[in-house]
Image: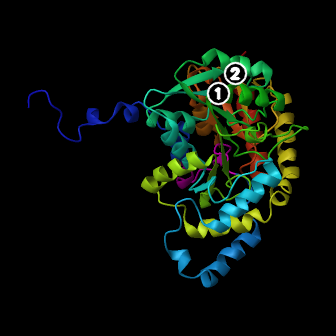
Amino acid sequence: MTGSSPPGAPHAFPKRVLGVSMPPIDALNTRMAQMNAAGGDVISLGQSVPFFGPPPRMIEAVRDALDSFGPRLHTYGPDAGIPELRHALARKLADFNGIEVDPDSQIMVTPGSNQAFMVTMMTILQPGDEVAIASPCYFSHHMAIELCGGVVREIPLGEESGFQMRMEEVERVLTPRTRAVVITSPNNPTGAVYDPGEVALMVRELTARGVYVVSDEAYEVFCYDGAKHVSPASLVDDAELVISLGSLSKTFGMTGWRIGYIAASAEVCRQAVKVQDAMAICAPIVCQVAAVAALDHMPAYPLGMMGEMKDRRRMLDAMLSETPALSWEKTHGAFFVMLRADVELDGRDTAWEMLERVGVLTVPGGAFGEQWSGFIRVSFGSPPRDRYEEALSRMASFFGVHARR
């Protein structure tokens, strides 16, 4: 037929897919691999992977399970997760987060918290529904909302306030089409830990209006300087419209095991499990067995790593105090920071230039919103200690040379 597009033509893909760009960390990681393969020496301060691995007892439990868990280890499990893990997560939510849920109907295990977010968006959004997220924003959240046919409404946050999210800023972007507001605290990419009183206000105001509050709590353990993480679902008597998303990836240094979860109302979980069945059926059983063993060490294991995290954060702060081209409005969570880079590079991207010139990988601020192109995100929790110290030295040298005169 005249004017028709052949099947598979590039412009035949849906706009919701074509309009989404891959995050720049993917291209940066590819270039880093090329440089290292060619004999280079690149240190990554990019992806937020903790320097530590999982508890040794978790690995032992997996070895034991290969012999003792029987046929269950090699087959599909319940879409919502094996009962042992859902019950372990319910205990963790009660003890650590102050959230009471029924493990049999209000928890769903997912292959990582990115999928937990994607499943949530596919479950609650109609095409054209709006989701408000803080800016700077986590690029995977942005991608998931658009891939599900939703519309992102960014909540601009101020560097001068330490990127705090407040109801007054949220109010400015709410419309009759707002379906959900995402709260990520401690925040990716800024490291901000939101004020508990402000979180409580947002949850009360939004749920009273029938708006979902989706809380991403992947970095809940990592707080500094007296800051405290608070789970939104623990702040209201009726948490029917609060969806809590969690991850074991950062908490236990097990990013490759891909275990996350959704804690929500029974009805949300009942609908969400349909989405998960179509996407993955269930998280890998061996990974769920590992997660049960890891949770036996909550919160002692991750808290045992906080001394090293605090040292690394102090080292970064000391380097910044001696590098005028870099500045940080101090935040108090996660294990990365958004740094303003005042440099002269003739329009070239700071992160790419630093990768090529001194072999240090960071994430361009523009990945988290175009208005943040003058920033870079630096993870202080990723490489081994000696490599981290070397990366800071290289950064100081790079920004000393390229500082704006």
Q: Residue furthest bottom?
A: 67
- Label 1 crowd bin: few (<14), some (14–19), many (20+), radius 10 Å: many
State the quadrant of the N terminus.
Answer: top left
Q: How many numbered callouts?
A: 2
Q: Residue furthest left?
A: 1
Secondary structure state at the residue bearing disc 2: loop
Task: Please give left or right for residue 310 compared with residue 44 in the image.
Answer: right
State the quadrant of the C terminus.
Answer: top right
The structure's colour scheme is rainbow
The one nearer the camera, 297 or 55, is 297
Q: Badge 1 is on which residue?
A: 136
Task: Please give left or right for residue 223 compared with residue 63 in the image.
Answer: right
Give the Cα distance between marks 2 and 1.
7 Å
| Magenta segment includes 295 | no
Q: Amino acid at mark 2?
A: Leu
Residue 176 lies in what quarter of the image? top right
Residue 157: give its label.
2
- Residue 287 locus on image (x, y percent): 61, 66
237, above or below 283, in the image: above
- Residue 230 locus on image (x, y percent): 80, 39
Q: Amino acid at mark 1?
A: Pro
- Residue 303 locus on image (x, y percent): 85, 54
Q: Residue at image x 67%, y 49%?
A: 246
The one nearer the camera, 222 or 344, is 222
Secondary structure state at the residue bearing disc 1: loop
Q: Which residues are magenta?
A: 33-49
300, above or below 154, in the image: below
Q: Is residue 350 visible?
A: no
- Residue 83 locus on image (x, y percent): 63, 66
Q: Is residue 71 visible?
A: yes
Q: Residue at image x 37%, y 33%?
A: 18
**Disc 2 and disc 1 in contact, CB within 8 angstroms:** yes
